[in-house]
Amino acid sequence: MRGGLSKTFAVLGAAGLLAVSACGNSDDGGGSGDTATKDVTVFTWWADGGEKAGLDGLVSVFKTDCKDYNFVNSAVAGGAGANAKQVLANDLQAGKPPSTFQAHAGAELKDYINAGQVDDVSGLYKDFGLDKAFPQNLIDQLTVDGKIYSIPANVHRANVVWTNPDVLKKASIDATKAPATVDAWIADLTKLKNAGVKAPLAVSKGFAQEMLVEAVLLGELGTDTFNGLWDGKTDWAGANVTAALNKYKTLLSFTNVDRESIDWSDALGYVNKGQAGYTLMGDWVAAQQLADKVPDSKYTYWPSPGSAGTFQFLADSFTLPTNGQNPEGTKCWLKTVGSAEGQKAFNTKKGSIPARSDANAADYPKYQQTAMADWKKDKIAGSCAHGSACSAGQNNDILSALSQFSGAQDVAKLQTAFGTAMKTS
Ligand code: GAL
């Protein structure tokens, strides 16, 4: 675990995790906010399904522990914050921050810090005993000049493939065994197509395609070379990247034609309904299966081909926005987020594992028990799609390149666009 975290944040650090900036202090009177309000407006993109179930878990603890305050749900629907991030950027720009908002640990958080939009919460770590609850190396890595800017709620895994064993049976494929390589996966997809499954790999728009291409790069390049793509140590122009992107192109040929118009939960629906054999998605899928009451026997999961032994991580955290409304109420929310009870209520429903080191695996569903074990022993990779490895600006450039690629399928153009995006901050 400790080793894993060191590696995690070596990745983040290299990508420029946290930079110093002069930030305001919400203790000074609440800025533009109405200091009398009891409302704590919580901005997320966890608007429905398993994601909302996770948020509801957190809210139930907040309602017990923070009776003086009202939870106000400011969720904006759309996977990975596809719509929420723009709404939030506009609100922050207009000087109308929510009481708190979710932000990914890593480069994405750095954007908010650099813009002076979030306050230092290191004092809260002391007040709430979080410096003891989180592993010391995690705290060290989240600390810049003695300041910490958010409280992590969880750790999610990105590099997971989810299957429908009944569909795979049509081509005599064993759903419990991960193909060892991307090529082996392509061979299985071909078998499924030949067995009459038209679009065996379900994928959705935007960030889901980004996750798929990241998974291919991770599987083909290996963990260290993959991490180097985000911290400048690996050349985006290399022949190994070209070869991986060509495999990504091949994978796209097995996907549903409506991939530009559906969200990740729709793609999962195709798998659950038997229209597809696989979807690659983060482990919020486990939460969705729980919310939809899909029995454990109806799906399997494994690390994306070629990435066994690597945990591609991201972490959701909550902030104390500069000049946000009701900073005292917000601190109570942050206390709930960091608490053992809050993390349990949230993560048992959210598909993620707790950021705290004192959780009891037996309290968690089967999927999270396997994720907890892997997190302790696996190598760690970052994720651009979920903010641990690249900034919001870089991510937006990559998303638009991928959306063009979904139509034109020009590998050389995509490869150049990746390189250019990562040279721009
Ligand atoms: C990620 C977020 C996860 C989950 C996912 C899908 O960015 O960290 O918690 O919400 O998007 O919406």
Image (cartoon, rainbow, N blue to C red):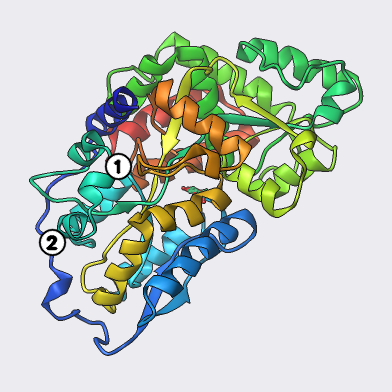
Q: In this figure, which residue is indicated by the disc labeled 1?
A: 107
Of the 4 image quadrants, the one containing the C terminus is top left
The answer to which of 185 and 403 lies nearer the viewer is 185
**Sequence-wise, which precedes: disc 2 or disc 1?**
2
Left or right: 361 as drawn, with respect to 294: left
Number of numbered discs: 2
Q: Residue at x 71, y 43 (%)?
A: 267
* Residue at image coords 44%, 73%: 64
Whether residue 187 appears in this view of the structure is: yes
- In this rendering, the answer to whether 187 lies above or below 387 is above
Residue 12 picture location, percent across and down:
28, 33
Q: Name which residue type carries label 1.
A: Ala
Q: Is residue 277 above or below residue 393?
A: above
Q: Secondary structure at mark 1?
A: helix
Residue 403 visible, this angle: no
Residue at (29%, 37%) from the top-left corner? 424
Q: Amino acid at mark 2?
A: Cys
How dense is the environment of label 2, judged by Cα within 10 Å: few (below 14), some, or many (20 and up)?
Answer: some
Which label belongs to residue 23?
2
* Label 1 environment density (alpha carbons within 10 Å; few <14, some 14–19, many ≥20): many
Q: Position of residue 237 (x, y in %)?
A: 39, 17
